């Protein structure tokens, strides 16, 4: 590849920073441990890329390390509190209008994985459910869901 039109000081491996959510960074105790593990893993990846002198891997590891370190620094550990209403950390069971039954735990954004039964407290579904109790209904994406359990 010709480098005729590239500045000498330009680092071709620089990557833009990952966007950070505008929502408070609430985390469960498990989520905090996961954040700490990610920071440690990216520190190791950064060190490995330095040893290998791999600029692309170094840039990626640096970006991820900045992101996860910032997320760890802004984390607000929030222990789930027992309540009859849906709140951060609650496990809530719902029944959709078409009869589907689903159960989710409301967690921090970095922990959310709907395929594993966790959703972000900032998601539209969670926002519609927070503050409601068993037997209440909520409108979500043009559908009505009924809360069948809160733990």
Image (cartoon, rainbow, N blue to C red):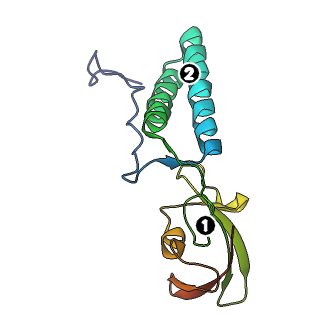
Residue 102 in the figure: left or right of residue 142: right
SS label for mark 2: helix
Q: Dot 1: within a 10 Å radius of its alpha carbon, few (fewer than 14), some, or many (20 or more) residues?
A: few
Quarter holding residue 89: bottom right
User: Does 99 sit left or right of 112 as displayed?
Assistant: right
Q: Which residue is drawn at 37% across and 36% down?
A: 16
Whole-angstrom CA distance, mark 2 to mark 1, is 39 Å
Q: Which residue is drawn at 35% across and 22% down?
A: 11
Q: Which residue lies furthest to the top in this view?
A: 51
| x, y percent for residue 110 | 55, 48
Quadrant of res 80: bottom right
Give residue 121's position: percent from left, percent from top: 52, 61
Residue positioned 57% across, 70% down in the render:
86
Q: Relative to residue 34, is residue 97 depicted above or below?
A: below
Q: Name the residue under label 2.
A: 43
Residue tagged by mark 1? 83
Q: In which quarter of the image is the C terminus?
A: bottom right
**Which is more N-terminal, label 1 or label 2?**
2
Which image quadrant for residue 125? bottom right
Residue at 45% across, 35% down = 67
Q: Callout 1: helix, strand or loop?
A: loop
């Amino acid at each position: 590849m010709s480098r005729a039109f590239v500045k000498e000081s330009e680092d071709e491996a620089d990557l833009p920073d990952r966007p950070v959510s505008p929502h408070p960074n609430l985390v469960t105790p498990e989520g905090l441990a996961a954040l700490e593990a990610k920071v440690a893993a990216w520190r190791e990846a950064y060190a490995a890329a330095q040893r290998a002198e791999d600029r692309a891997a170094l840039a990626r590891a640096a970006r991820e390390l900045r992101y996860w370190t910032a997320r760890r620094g802004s984390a607000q550990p929030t222990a789930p509190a027992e309540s009859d209403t849906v709140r951060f950390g609650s496990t809530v069971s719902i029944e959709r209008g078409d009869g589907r039954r689903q159960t989710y735990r409301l967690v921090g954004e970095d922990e959310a994985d709907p395929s594993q039964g966790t959703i972000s407290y900032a998601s539209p579904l969670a926002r519609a459910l927070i503050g409601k109790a068993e037997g209440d209904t909520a409108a979500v994406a043009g559908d009505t869901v009924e809360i069948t359990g809160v733990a």
